Image: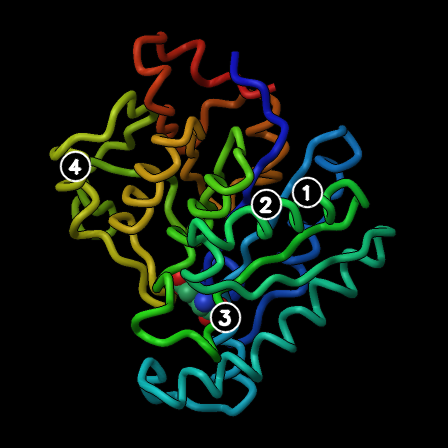
Amino acid sequence: MKTMNKIVIKVGTSSLIQGNALPSNRYLSELAQQIVQLQNQGLQPILVSSGAVATGRAILKLSTDSRSSPLKQTLASIGQVKIMQVWSELFASFGFQVGQLLLTKENFSAHNDQLLRETLDCLLQHRIIPIINENDTAATHETGVGDNDNLAALVAKSIGADTLILLTDQEGLYTADPRHNPEAKLISHIPQINAKIYTFAADSTGSIGTGGMATKIKAAKIASRSKTQTIIASSRYPNVLLALLAGKPIGTLISEESNTHMNVKNQRGIN
Ligand code: GLU
């Protein structure tokens, strides 16, 4: 059975805002509560939180496309403060401090990766909850990772996480986009990512955040190469993190590469 110790949890924009304009306090509170429970059970959770650009857009009451420079940078700078304020207050209400890391591709270079790993380790040793986002205000096309699924996978690789959890507005990876195809079936386990898996993921994109299933599968591939298993699961599943910790077979599990020979049943245990 896979032991869960260091866990990177990524939550996307559409999950954070839950159909509203601003992040849902209630949803963030539920998530913070679960993360605190993981901490209290001796695990080391690291949160990758999107939502900065969408939050900035809501604060400025913009409805136009905000993906071009410098508006995206502007919205991220406004929204990041707000979303961190919410996270910080919520975790403080459970007795925990948070530490913010705004990263770009450069933080994962051979030269800088060790500093990132040691900083995250230091935060975890002090029982601080690290909260990570891309540094959208400073990142350029060249220096940006581009999406937080990949960012979360790079973080998981850097710190040697056992598990990467990608929370999203779908139940997991389906054989087709379930929003358009009623025949689509949920894939509960992917022992190894192959061309067919990329095809299943290709047509499924989220409506608000940057990522869709394609970026999640790419992220899972990065993670699997560094012995991290990935679980894509619904952010709406009640107490999803605790359910996963208890070994509930929800979402899509993507095994790390070295374990592809193990049987599916054994793969789902993460306690
Ligand atoms: N970093 C972006 C934000 O916080 C989101 C990127 C993504 O959706 O992957 O708004």
**Residue occupying image coordinates x 66% and y 69%:** 84
Of labels 3 and 2, earlier in sequence is 2
Quadrant of ligand 1: it is: bottom left
Give the numbered dot on residue 121.
1
Colour scheme of this structure image? rainbow
Q: Vertically, is 151 above or below 83?
A: above
Label 4 neighbourhood size at 10 Å, few (<14), some (14-19), many (20+)? few
How far apart marks 3 and 2 lie (CA) works out to: 17 Å
Q: Position of residue 112 (x, y in %)?
A: 51, 54
Q: Are marks 2 and 1 in contact (CB under 8 Å)?
A: yes
Mark 1 or 4 closer to N-term?
A: 1
The CA distance from mark 4 to mark 2 is 43 Å
- Left or right, residue 211 beside residue 159: left
Q: Are marks 4 and 3 in contact (CB under 8 Å)?
A: no
Q: Calculate the distance from the C-alpha at mark 4 to the C-alpha at mark 3.
A: 39 Å
**Marked residue nearer the N-terminal end (4 or 3):** 3
Q: Secondary structure at mark 3?
A: loop
Is the residue indicated by label 1 positioned so its CB lies within 8 Å of ligand 1? no
Q: Which residue is mark 4?
A: 183
Task: Give the Cα distance between marks 1 and 4.
Answer: 45 Å
Q: Horizontal and vertical percent for residue 239?
A: 62, 39
- Using the image, determine if residue 106 lies above or below residue 244: below
Circle 3 residues within 10 Å: few <14, some 14–19, many ≥20: many
Work out whether residue 17 can be spotted: yes
